Amino acid sequence: MIKQETSAPRGILHSAPVNDFGTFARYTPSTEQLRFFVEHYWSIQWSVPEPQQRENLPHPSIHLVVERNRSGVFGVVSRKFIRTLEGTGWVFGIKFKPGAFRPLFGASVAELTDTIMPLHELFGPDGTAYEEMMLSLTNDGEKVACAEQFLAARLPEPDDQIALINCIVEEVMKNKQIMKVEDISERFNIGVRTLQRLFNDYVGVPPKWIIKRYRLFEAVDAVNSGPDADWTQMALQLGYFDQAHFIKDFKQMIGRSPGEYRKNPR
């Protein structure tokens, strides 16, 4: 039996939940080996009378996605991700942990940033066969089983660099005082240039991007949870030196100032 995750997703830039027009679910990998590489599987099904636009702040993760006429390996998206859902459809994805797709790709994943690679280009005929099999399935349990069978035949041995990257990302997520790459360097005793090369090679974005993204996740969560926000106080709580720097980063990543986003979060 597959285990469904119940925690709320982060980085959603709209107020209307997916369940208003379909279903969204996430599932935990079944084995320790799979959990080392894969954060979770996710599934969205929808049926909408008119187009629905959704915006998200992406995580520093690569996704292997199956959707009719749109399957592929999705590299990290450096800015907000916008998707319009139309008609009836579904999509199933594998969300890899930060850095964990590097051994499967066999090269720097910076090549994938802001791009989509068709499955057959990376996996050859096996990628095409996997896509066709997934598209023939009707329920999430079957899709998870198919995905795990595909991954089990390809996953390498655990990579110490992946474990290190995820320790760093976890620390950035929970420690609001980390605002500079130098802060990571000091905590992990790793040179700044070494960190930059590591994240470029394994994650596809620099560590500074990771820091800003997770600080802004917290800001978006705060705005989504209530309309009354003190931007100066929020900036200080997130570790910013002042409100101006916070607003600049928010607008750069999301495309709107915090005040504009609060007025119209969709």
Image: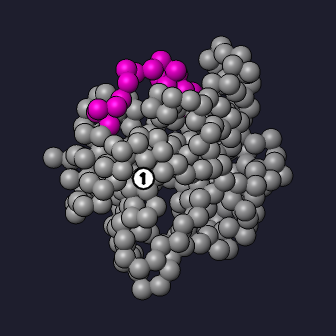
Magenta part mainly helix, strand or loop? helix
Name the one closer to the observer, 55 or 212: 55
Question: Is the residue marked by circle 1 packed among few (<14), some (14-19), or many (20+) residues within 10 Å?
Answer: many
Q: How is the image coloured?
A: one colour
Name the one closer to the observer, 239 or 182: 182
Q: Which residue sits at x=29%, y=45%?
A: 147
Q: Is residue 162 magenta?
A: yes
Counting every numbered tag in the picture gives 1
Left/right placement of residue 71 relative to residue 177 reads: left
> Which image quadrant is residue 222 in?
bottom right
Q: Is residue 106 above or below residue 209?
A: above
Q: Which residues are magenta?
A: 151-171
**What SS does tag 1 mark?**
strand
The residue most toward the bottom is 49
> Which part of the image, by quadrant, shows the C terminus?
bottom right
Q: Which residue sits at x=37%, y=71%?
A: 89
Residue matched to label 1: 65
The residue most toward the front is 125
Q: Is residue 185 above or below residue 211?
A: above
Q: Which residue sits at x=59%, y=43%?
A: 112
* Residue 240 visible in the picture: yes
* Amino acid type, residue under disc 1 in the picture: Val
